[in-house]
Amino acid sequence: MEETFQQSITDLEQFHKFTEEEMKILENADRAAEEMAMPEYEHYLKHELSTESVEIAGKYGLFGIPIKKEYGGQDASPLTLALAQERLSQNGLGFSTLYDVQIFICGLAIQRWGREEQKKEYLKEIAKGNKIFAFGLTEPDAGSDPSSMRTNYTKKGSKFIINGTKYLISNGSIADFIILFATSAEEKNNITAFIVDTKSEGFEVAMRLKEKIGLFTSDTDMLQFNNIEVPEENILGSLGKGLHVGYSSLINGRLGIGSASLGLIDGALNAVINRSRERVQFGKPIGKHQLIQQHISAIRQNLEMARWPVYTAALKKEIYDKNPDNKELIAEMDLHSSLAKRISSRLAFESADRAVQVFGGFGYSLLSPVGQLFCDSRVTRIYEGTDEIQDLKIASSLLGKDFEAYK
Ligand SMILES: Cc1cc2nc3c(=O)[nH]c(=O)nc-3n(C[C@H](O)[C@H](O)[C@H](O)COP(=O)(O)OP(=O)(O)OC[C@H]3O[C@@H](n4cnc5c(N)ncnc54)[C@H](O)[C@@H]3O)c2cc1C
């Protein structure tokens, strides 16, 4: 098993006893990450999605990690899921972005909010990796403030007619289903979450965003919904309570981004250690120059500083999952997933920057392992709630509800 990954598991054993099944999952995540590395790299250079990664993850059963056994999953602990995501992110965040949306956000949202028929219908497919999900919250004019969304629904008999545009949607053009958020055309503050089949008439991928500054193997799209008909039974959660579904999904999603950022730091550290041993300047390996050692030390410190908020959030999630309606636990989980994302993403960005510096001119190229890490690290401070929104959430968790500055 990859060394840094093995160390994380060993360190965690004092807090969580991994079952034999969980250890097997982690070994599979390790193998899958190894197998994905080359196709991801090749597709990264061509700026295209790597469908091989989805097949590899499916082959190793990674889509079922947190899904309950009765729906075809392994029902493993949140810590196991976080560690798997960490390992899958060591070479870049293309696949791990797909995985975050598919599993941390959509899979767990259906497991939490879905009716029994919905769980039977969708979770089994999610666990196998047969059907891909997207999460449609953001719009061109509604990002940090989703309550200002314009995508709307009107009721027509037992169906809903949905119109609108969603923007920056990961997995958008490859998704079989989208958890789509829309507001009532008639009543204000009545946002509802729907499970929408992308084969529905009126669904259109309006634009595939290729001109990104990273995440080249991840699919990011503008989606158009023109008079889409959605049956009543496809409401996820209840009518008018869509933001409950949305915000609770993002709590899980932030744990996913925190874990992915942690994996990115692992990747940066491994890359600089190898490079510092091999690259010779002034007659000795650059690792013998003290200022290079300072970069290595700083990235190792970042890894340590990012590990605990992420692992703490994962351990908290185990408790929260057992009592998902307990308001105190929800608030605690919300805070810890924000801390995990905020701390880990900042340190990932800084670590990737240092790694590029250690690699010198080669580091500035996408051909180097750290060029990709640098490009991919930037988005972790934006998607699923920006740095600023996390800061406001963290501060108001201390100051009290009256101080919620982002509402
Ligand atoms: C690659 C990528 C993939 C994505 N995937 C998805 C997806 O799958 N599904 C989805 O729904 N969305 C997705 N997003 C959208 C993402 O979640 C939003 O970009 C993010 O929430 C920020 O919204 P915005 O871009 O509209 O920025 P804005 O909300 O316009 O913010 C602009 C700036 O203002 C700041 N700001 C806003 N409000 C406040 C405030 N109250 N106080 C202080 N500062 C504030 C922000 O922090 C930011 O710095 C993705 C984005 C990217 C880049």
Image: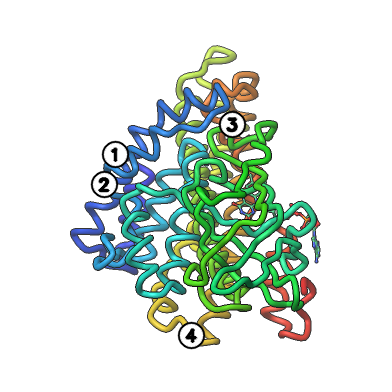
Of 280 and 246, the residue lying toward us: 246
- The disc labelled 1 sits on which kind of residue? Arg
* Residue designated by label 1: 31
Q: Earlier in the sequence, mark 4 or mark 2?
A: 2
Q: Which residue position is annotated with label 3?
A: 292
Up/down of 211 relative to 204, above or below = above
Q: Residue at position x 55%, y 20% from top?
A: 367
Label 2 to label 1, Cα distance in Å?
A: 6 Å
Residue displayed at 71% across by 52% down = 165
- Comparing labels 3 and 2, the label whose residue is closer to the camera: 2
State the residue position of label 4.
Answer: 325
**Spatial separation of the CA atoms under disc 3 and disc 2:** 32 Å
What secondary structure is marked by label 3? helix
Look at mark 2 in the image and give the residue it sits on: 27
Q: Position of residue 42 (x, y in %)?
A: 47, 23
Q: Earlier in the sequence, mark 1 or mark 4?
A: 1
Image coordinates of residue 35 in percent, x first then y, are 33, 32
Q: Quadrant of the C terminus?
A: bottom right
Asked if ligand 1 lies within 8 A of label 1, the reply is: no
Query: Which amino acid lies under the numbered mark 4 shown in the image of this protein?
Result: Asp
Q: Are marks 2 and 1 in contact (CB under 8 Å)?
A: yes
